[in-house]
Amino acid sequence: MRSWLSLALILGGCASADKPDPNQQNPDAKPLTDADTTPDACPDTDNDGACNAVDKCAGKDDRMDADSDTIPDGCERCPGMDDRIDANMNMTPDCAELMTRTIDLKKVGTNFWRGWHANTSASHSTENDNTITGTTGGTIYNTYYVFSLAGFTATTISEVKLELEMESYVSSDATEVISLWDVTTPAATVEQTAGVNIAIHNDLGTGHKYGMATVSSATVGPANLVSFTLDMQANTDVKAKLGSDFIVGAHLDATPGYVRFSAAAEARIARLVIKYLP
């Protein structure tokens, strides 16, 4: 009798194996394998929450935007500045594009901040805007040009040129060389010191040479500006003087003879042309 009961239990167990499990939502479903898994529809290789297909800065965290210009820090052209500003719409942000600024000679009232200091008894005066440069009557004249950089900001200075209009050329030589120099004396001291000051005279023609240009009688007048491209040290010095005055000294390298970039208080072209990144 027990054998019949055991057989019945076995048969009943086999029958129950064919019945669906009531805990399964889909009785016909088979166990999933890796081959059955749907690929991720939004891969995010850099794990910044942005799908690769819409990632602004691949490999970097799109959520990091310190200057709030919508450009992730990892792809900034100009950290700390707005990369979206592009005035000429050439696809290069203004902050990453060289700009040009022209700065005319400093002028206070009717007084241009230019002039000479001599190595002898010739007396300097702030009202004298004559810029005789060279040697005449045994006296050597060095000249200066002051430019106000007030209100001018830049992250990088890449090029500085000085352009001068030459008023006259007096020399027996066909050409003369004018050299430009750094000036360590404060601009206001150079401009406002009256009388003879040999230290200032020397400072205008010694130290670090920014550059030079060759002049002749053919370069006289506004149609033939004398252009000096200054060196890398000038770029550094201009950057250091942003917000204040930048001064350049000029010296004629040979004697005798002189050139003049202004005779008195008349208006003459004297300007810096600066290429920079804002």
Image: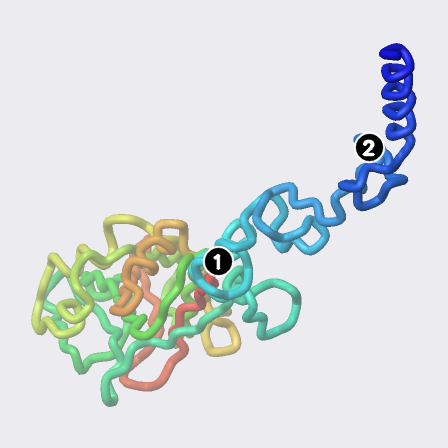
How many numbered circles does the render carry? Answer: 2
Q: Based on the displayed image, in which of its 4 quarters is residue 40 positioned?
A: top right
Q: In the picture shown, does residue 38 fall above or below 163? A: above
In which quadrant of the rendered view does residue 70 lie? bottom right
Alpha carbon separation for disc pair 2 and 1: 45 Å
**Which is in the foreground here, disc 2 or disc 1?**
2
Residue 101 drawn at (x, y percent): 45, 71
Q: Amino acid at mark 1?
A: Asp
Toward the viewer: 163 or 274? 274
Q: Nearest the camera: 134 or 225? A: 225
Residue at 30 percent of width and 55 percent of height: 181
Marker disc for residue 65: 1
Q: Amino acid at mark 2?
A: Pro
Towards the viewer: 148 or 254: 148
**Residue closest to the far front:** 1
SS at mark 1 in the image: loop
Residue 31's disc is 2
Q: Secondary structure at mark 2?
A: loop
Viewed as shown, does residue 212 lie left or right of 19?
Answer: left
Q: Report the residue at 86% width, 41% height from top.
A: 27
Which residue is rendered at x = 13% and y = 74% of the image?
192
56 or 92: nearer the viewer: 56
Question: Is 202 left, or right, of 143 in this rendering?
Answer: left
Q: Quadrant of the N terminus?
A: top right
- Counting from the top left corner in percent of width and height, residue 50 is at 63, 53
Dot 2, how many residues are within 10 Å of its Cα: few (below 14), some (14-19), or many (20+)? Answer: few
Residue drawn at the location 79% of the way across and 31% of the way down = 34
In this rendering, the answer to whether 258 lies above or below 49 is below
